Image (cartoon, rainbow, N blue to C red):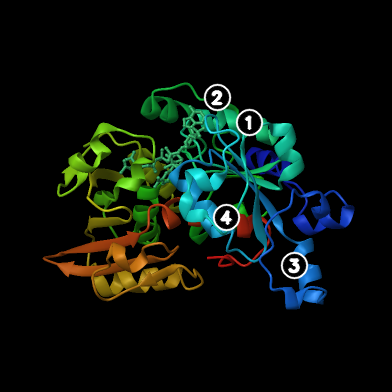
Amino acid sequence: MHGPSPAEAATAAFRCPPLTDLVHSGKIDHEETPAPIRRHSSFLIGSPFIANHLLTMIRVGIIGATGYTAFEAIRLIQGHPQAEVTAVTSRGDEGKSIVEVHPALRGSIDLPLSLADPAVLAQQCDVAFCCLPHAASAESVRSLREVGLRVIDLSADFRLREVSVYEEWYATKHPWPELLGQVAYGLPELFEDQIKGADLVANPGCYPTSAILPLAPLLQAKAIDANIIVDAKSGVSGAGRTPKLVNLYCEANESITAYAIGSHRHQPEMVDVLERFTGVQADILFTPHLTPMDRGILATIYVQGPGLTAAKVKQMWNETYADAPFVHIVDAPPATKHVSGTNHVHMGAFDAGGRVVLCCAIDNVTKGASGAAVQNMNCMFGLDQTMGL
Ligand SMILES: NC(=O)C1=CN([C@@H]2O[C@H](COP(=O)(O)OP(=O)(O)OC[C@H]3O[C@@H](n4cnc5c(N)ncnc54)[C@H](OP(=O)(O)O)[C@@H]3O)[C@@H](O)[C@H]2O)C=CC1
Ligand SMILES: CC(=O)N[C@@H](CCC(=O)OP(=O)(O)O)C(=O)O
């Protein structure tokens, strides 16, 4: 008999009992939750459905609640039948209502922004979504894990396995390097078993989601050369709400440009995660483009392999994603508009002069960030992956 591997032992150390056990043990007392908005109809009050519903509500804290991914997370969670946002934090907008900074949330939530105090958050929440820039996020994740909160980190801080790779591409020291290589990568289509029951999940980058999903089955089957070109276009919300010159309306509107050519930090994430899943080290040339859309990513990927055809690609995709509720294999070229505001992934494969062109469309803020985070929360808490999505 072999004992658990170091990675398994470390993951187990970060596990906590499922929510139902916490409820039964009395650790979670929803009566103490600060007046969440109830979304059920009054005629249901007193029914067994509502009793069960209230007992199992997951209380979610949103850290860095003034940004774009936070907005999307709150929008989705407030529509989720078994979760609700119970805390929202900000460094600069403490005391304001969340609807002052996100007016589109008016009517679905009314909570004041507070500073992120881990001890208070531990009382208010069961899980925290860290919607912060990298490096700042790892600091926050550490303090939240120390008070026992389960965490989904939307930043890049825990996605890579090697500290040296992180420090090279992010040009900063990692605040919690011991943990790299031991955190579940939040792509349930490929890593569901690691996410189930995990207490810390690294939500994927938006571009990597759009490249890894189409490529993983093909690399795993050794059906394509490992030399791959990924050409991807993103809407401007991908850059976050914090103002930057290139993202101003007059700069980005009616224009399209490539950026970070040969140097974007999502390239090593694609290589690392694909190797983790397939055992194959891909040589990926990744070029991102900024496009004048609010949201959406379209990845166009050029692959070739002996006897490879679009029909064979679709067969491999169908096998890998037979049980993946958000992955759709489509015949017409995918479009960002077809997935806008949803957690869906549209993938198409097309024969083109001896190569096969793969196209994958996602919404960068939903499947590329907060929709994936809700999908991960569902897996972590033993709910159906699609709940609230
Ligand atoms: N936008 C997207 O499509 C995607 C984003 N991501 C990642 O998700 C994370 C959040 O992105 P997004 O919501 O777009 O970013 P935003 O810039 O829109 O928001 C980030 C929030 O973090 C807070 N913040 C900024 N700097 C710091 C700091 N140094 N320390 C603590 N808090 C800080 C700010 O809130 P306040 O000033 O109020 O404290 C801000 O509102 C990032 O790591 C990003 O890379 C991942 C996938 C897709
Ligand atoms: C259009 C645009 O600027 N997009 C962002 C992607 C944001 C993201 O997902 O970054 P993290 O990996 O840090 O989470 C970028 O290229 O930097």
Q: Position of residue 173 (x, y in %)?
A: 48, 21
Q: CA distance from mark 4 to mark 2?
A: 24 Å
Q: Residue furthest top?
A: 173
Mark 3 or mark 4, earlier in chain = 3
Q: Position of residue 329 (x, y in %)?
A: 35, 72
Q: Residue at x 75, y 55 (%)?
A: 18
Q: Residue furthest left?
A: 353
Q: Front-most of 16 and 46? A: 46
Residue 336 location, quadrant: bottom left
Mark 4 or mark 2, earlier in chain = 2
Q: Position of residue 133 (x, y in %)?
A: 46, 34
Callout 1 touching callout 2 (CB < 8 Å): yes
**363 horizontally vs 290: left or right:** right
Residue 381 location, quadrant: bottom right
Relative height, residue 194 to residue 200 (above, below): below
Q: Residues within 10 Å of mark 2 (few under 14, many from 20)?
A: some
Mark 3 highlights which residue? Answer: 53
State the SS at label 2: loop
Indicate which label's residue lies in the foreground, 3 or 4: 3
Mark 1 or mark 4, earlier in chain = 1
Q: Residue at x 36, y 38 (%)?
A: 268
